[in-house]
Image (tube, helix red, strand yellow):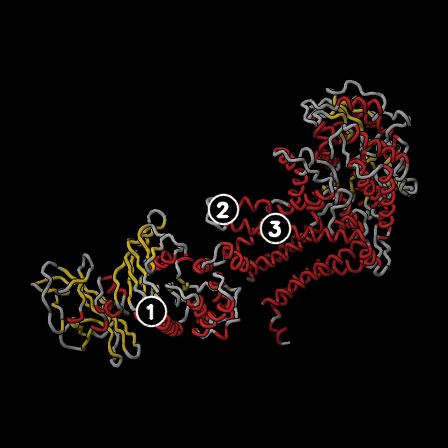
Amino acid sequence: MAGVRLSGVTKRYGAGITVLDNIDLEVHDREFMVLVGPSGCGKSTVLRVLSGLEPVDAGEIRIGDRVVNDLAPRDRDIAMVFQSYALYPHLTVFENIAFGLRVRKTPKQELARLVGEAAEVLSLSDKLEKLPRHLSGGERQRVALGRAIVRKPQVFLFDEPLSNLDAKLRVQMRAEISALHKRLQITTIYVTHDQVEAMTMGERITVLNGGHIQQTDEPLTLYNTPANRFVAEFIGSPPMNLMSLTKKDGVFQYAGHPLPFTGNTGAAEPSLDTVLAGIRPEHVDVAEGGGGLPAQVVLVEPMGGETIVYLALEDGTRLVAKIDGMRRFTLGETLMVTFDHQQIHWFDPRTERRISL
Amino acid sequence: MRTYLLPLVLLVLVASCGEGTEKIPEVVIWEFMDPKERVILEESIEAFQATNPGFVVKHTNYPPEQLRTQFLTAAMAGGGPDLVFGPADNAGPFSVAGVIQPIEKLFDNQYLAGFEPLAFDTLDGHIWTLPSQVGNHLCLIYNRALVDEVPGTLREMLDQAETLTVDEDGDGRPDTYGLVFDSKEPFWLVPFLGAYGGRVMNANSEPTLDTQAMVNALAMMKNIRVDRGLMPPGTDIQLAETLFKEGKAAYTINGYWSWGGYLDAGLDFGVTSIPIHDETGLWPAPFVSSRGYSVNANLKGAKLERALETLRYLVSPAVQIRTAHELYVIPSSIEAVKDPAIQSDMRIKAAWEQLRHGKRMPVVPEMRAIWDAMRPAYQNVINGEMTPQEAAKAMQADAIKKIREMKG
Amino acid sequence: MAGARRYRTAYLFLAPAVLVMLAVVLYPFIYNVAISFSNMSLYHLRDPQFIGLAHYKTIFLETEIWGIFGKTILWTAINVVSHLTLGIGLALLLNQEVRGRAWFRALLILPWAMPQYITALTWKGMFNYEYGAVNLLLKAVHLPAVPWLSNETWAFIAPIIANVWLGFPFMMVVALGALQSIPKEMYEAAQLDGANWWYQFRRITLPMLKPVLGPAAVLGTIWTFNNLNVIWLVTNQGEPADKTHILVTYVYKAAFHYYRYGYAAAFSIVIFLILLSFVVYYMRIQKEEV
């Protein structure tokens, strides 16, 4: 088993485009690390340079204690599951899983045993003679997994493996992959653009944007203390509300209103005139009267257990609130909005970094 | 939808009315002519149409094989063109299949008497083609820069050709050859067969290939190509023409169709008869055949009259003289031959002389089997894979087999 | 019955096509079968008589024809195998990221774009013993000239060369299309599994090309088996000495040189049956695989 370490890794395409800019990333041995970010952020490229499918322009890649920069993919002892599964349509499930073993000239009995084991783990034992086109989406996904686990590699790489499945299967496979990792204890790097997948599966999560690492942390840490505005907005659904506050009379105010915080208003950062205040929807409270900012209901999405309410402040700024599902709202009604001060995230509007007030 | 329909229906009606009333019957000709000859045909047709309003003459060019099969198929089905132009041997299959009509029943004797008798081929006692030219035969052609005087006998001529075969740069391959001709096609063997008194078939169209004359002719060809080495191995028509055009050959044996190319190449050449054989005292006898028009058997009445009127113009002395003058073919019309323009052309005159020594090429379909039987055995002699005796025997056997198969 | 009513419009639309097919395919075919039992030839054009299986008997008893049949198989096999090998090879090269790829592709498709007739005659000229380009090239590298068109063996190799030249672009285009539809992840997955180029070619590329190249090869086999033009034109109608015939040129000669219509009709039925059994055999294999 082995950890993975990227130090100062840079990857460029052509002359102008830098996809990975001086990336430092450490994945511990046996860890399940999720790379998440919007499309084009460079997360898949991390997998491609790690696997050796593409060379890096600068930096060092280590797997275990070996520097693998100059090793061919086959010598890096890693397995990858592709978004498209990359199953061979002309080979049976058995042969698809056995492909890597055959390349390595594994003895026949050994090969049958290993494929059998992998199939057992993935509940594919009765599908071994079928061709991929006769399988369901979930089964194909499992064959792709089988092909990766059968070789017992040092590192697993997953490149958006669930994005071709429907929502229900996705939830199921999420759990299966997590369970598989617990059982096999193989270092895993999992790329996704879906922050729900990231939150539910990752032991740690790395958020990437524009070829830079934004933050690497455990899921709840990431949620509770986003390092910057990008992470704050990217993680969480619906996304965090951001409001620009201006200092007046020594306190930050919103559009001339002193903010209707419940609890302590806190002391202001002395050097800043404006700040960004981030409030997650579940920390927005609404009441039919009393103090607070007046806001009009523009859209209501009842989800059952909770209701998402979209509000418009007087100057048109939108706010999203996640409210207990038992309450009812009518479009156009005016509500008074209040926030819990303890739950506000503060960001410097220029650097967009997290600050504390 | 409906608004578009009515004009469409009207259009169709108007179009079909026009079709019915105004149609001028066309005279259709299918021909196998080379491009220069076709230009003359086109201009002749224009001239004819100009002086004969109401006549529309159309022509379509076909390669020889297609001309034959297409015409056979079309005429068998009751259609086809009115006139078909090609070599006289087309008359063989056409007349056997009954798709053309005898010429002597279409024109009176007085008109036909205006043609050179040698130009008529008969089959089953009928004339099937009205010739527009005669000859199509091989002559001896020499490069005046290399040959001062053509010797009087065949042996002397071959000896002279041997001295003219020279390897100047000493690479083991001659740079100038004495005598080049197509050594693959038995058409070039025929004159030498005649020099020994042989014929390819008898009057009953039965092959007569296994004869001493054939053995001697084959031996002579081998002597020319191999023993004397007067031409390079594998010389075919293209190679022979190229060598002669480039001035790399003293003599060639070829037909009138090659003269234009030699003139274009700026060659000063003479034409004469292949010299008489020293021992047999016989003239080499190239096959002589004519080219001309045959009349579709399906034609009758007014349509036939129109076709014959067109035909009379196309074989008229005026057209023949022009063709002869530009393409060096020998006219079939006696009046045209007597024309001073023709009489003053030394080459055409020489070809006319050679014609006198020639033998008429049979037009029967069996000729095809004879050619195909002669070709491989002849080539085998040249390649040294058969003796002349073996080859003569093989030709005869093969020809008999092929003719039997044809007759089914 | 319900189906017939439901699809009536569809049948109506199909009817003209079906009628034309009947007229131009089925009718001549039946006519061909009919005259194959007759002695129809130039001499019996208007009065053919029924002679039963006589032509078929001749065909199977003629020893010469078995030699031609063998040559046809050889001709077809060498051509199709060469077309496939060259086509796949060049497609693999063109599938790489090379500079000027579009240009190369256009250049390589050119032999296919030329009319077969012209290409064949050009090759015939290039095989000329003394002045042909091929022998001039051989001479330039101090190799002996080859009697391309006069020696029985060489005269068979010459049209094969010409036809390989004519045929590979089709397979190349088909293979290139198929190659481009193979997702590159399959190769990447194989690379990670440790497969080298050759292993990837054998276990991924070839099997993935098969569904497309299989039918193309069958089509190519039929075309080549029945390729009249190239042999006919390059060897000048089967020269030397009718030793370079394949079945279809032999039939063509019988029909249009010797006007042996009944015999040629019977012979084409035999060729048809040979090709039919080949296609049926192929389709059976195909079905077993699925």
Q: Position of residue A66 (x, y in %)?
A: 34, 57
Describe residue C242's horizontal placement relative to residue A52 as left or right: right
| Residue highlighted by disc 2 | C102
Tell me the amino acid under the disc marked 3. His
Where is mark 3, residue-wise?
A: C83
Quadrant of the rendered image containing residue A48: bottom left
Badge 3 or badge 2: first in the primary sequence: 3
Q: Which residue is mark 1?
A: A197
Quarter of the image where the C terminus of chain C is located: bottom right
Of C121 and C48, the residue lying toward us: C121
Q: Chain of mark 2?
A: C
In the foreground, C33 or A77 = A77
Q: Helix, strand or loop at disc 1?
A: helix
Q: Does any portion of residue C183 appear in the rendered image?
A: yes
Residue A23 position by quadrant:
bottom left
**CB contact under 8 Å: marks 3 and 2:** no
For mark 1, name the chain: A
